[in-house]
Image (tube, helix red, strand yellow):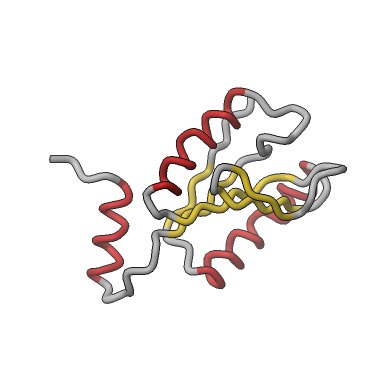
Amino acid sequence: MTRSVIERCEASREGRGEDRAPLRILLLNERCHRHRRAGGAESHLFEVFSRLVAQGVQVTLLCAGEAGLPARDEHRGVQIARLGSGLFDFYSGLRREVRRRVERDGIDLVVEAHNKV
């Protein structure tokens, strides 16, 4: 039987003697559902990751900020953190922000959803 990503991550944490805290996923995508250029990719991400949230997984989406949108938000249980005020800020600060969040928040899995052409 094939184990899910969640089961493999949990088994890995147990093998290292870590606690049974919820699995923590950091999701990376340029846009969130409220971005003016959001489309099917963003809808799909929230469909998939909100289902994981329903199973007890903690999911945070890190995306580019945009004028008129708050730096912090939530949609369908997914926490949203907007970085900077546009794509340049997002990409120039992404590496540093991911490293900071992995170290600070104990992120178990980083998912990059880069689906733009």
Identify whether 16 is placed above or below 86: below
As drawn, the residue found furthest toward the right would be 67
Identify whether 65 is placed above or below 38: below
Q: Position of residue 103 (x, y in %)?
A: 53, 71
- Position of the N terminus, as image quadrant, is top left
In-image side of 84 versus 1 (left or right): right
Identify the residue at image location x=58%, y=65%.
Answer: 101
In-image side of 108 versus 35 (left or right): left
Identify the residue at image location x=57%, y=36%.
Answer: 114
Identify the residue at image location x=31%, y=57%.
Answer: 9
Q: Position of residue 36 (x, y in %)?
A: 78, 30
Q: Position of residue 61 (x, y in %)?
A: 59, 48
Give residue 21's quadrant in the image.
Answer: bottom left
Q: How many marks?
A: 0
In-image side of 103 versus 13 (left or right): right
In front of the other: 42 or 115: 42
- Position of the C terminus, as image quadrant, is top right
Q: Position of residue 105 (x, y in %)?
A: 53, 69
Identify the residue at image location x=63%, y=57%.
Answer: 95
In front of the other: 12 or 95: 12
